[in-house]
Amino acid sequence: MSENQSEDQPKKESESQLTQILLQKKQAWLKVREKTSRLEQEKWEKRVRELYNQIKEWLNPLQEEELLDFSEHSEAILNGDGEEEKVITYFAINFFNDKAIEFEPIGLKVDDVYGRVDMKLDSDKIMIVIKHKDSDWKLVRSNNPQNPPVYEEFDQKNFEQLVTEFVQYFDDQLED
């Protein structure tokens, strides 16, 4: 029996050493992943803020005419330990008649794109996406799962066209 114990003893020590090394490596890996994830989240939040600022710049003349206004509010998302994991900033274009276009950041790495913000126009939803980490914003008008997505440039012309289509609906409501 003492022979079996002596054979088992070195095995347990090596497992213990292996366990300790793996635990240390895992901790180091998790720390790097958390830091990378946090930095990536901060970059995402910055990209979303830049998107909102671009929209404000395009629509600023209409705000000066008091035809619309902007609003934002932020919401902290907490992790399991109660620590702030990320901040989601919602944005809205509010029109003179209480209609609004709302923007909701959905997040990173969703629906086969790097990042996505949903633009809600009443019951319609347009996705504004970043396809790859360093690419520009794109509009996705069709979110029908049976059809492949059609990507358009997110530029002032395409954005104003969407807003114009939304605003034209105001007249339809007045005729009823």
Image (spheres, helix red, strand yellow):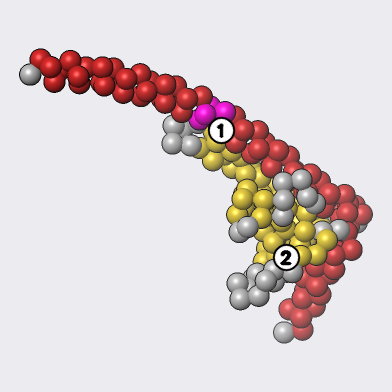
The answer to whether residue 152 of the structure is visible from this angle is: yes
Per the rendered image, the range of residues in magenta is 29-33
* Magenta stretch holds residue 60: no
Residue 93, disc? none
Residue 43: image location, x then y, percent: 70, 38
Q: In front here: 117 or 98?
A: 117
Q: Quadrant of the C terminus?
A: bottom right
Residue 12: image location, x then y, percent: 25, 21
Q: Amino acid at mark 1?
A: Arg
For the point 77% across and 70% down, the residue is 166
Left or right of 174: which side holds 34?
left
Q: Looking at the picture, does residue 60 appear above or below residue 144?
A: above
Residue to which mark 2 is pinned: 140
Residue 41: image location, x then y, percent: 64, 39
Residue 33, disc? 1
Q: For the stretch drawn in magenta, what is the main secondary structure?
A: helix
Q: Amino acid at mark 2?
A: Val
Residue 69: image location, x then y, percent: 79, 53
Q: Secondary structure at mark 1?
A: helix
The answer to whether residue 102 of the structure is visible from this angle is: no
The CA distance from mark 1 to mark 2 is 31 Å
Sequence order check: which comes first, mark 1 or mark 2?
1
For the point 17% across and 15% down, the residue is 6
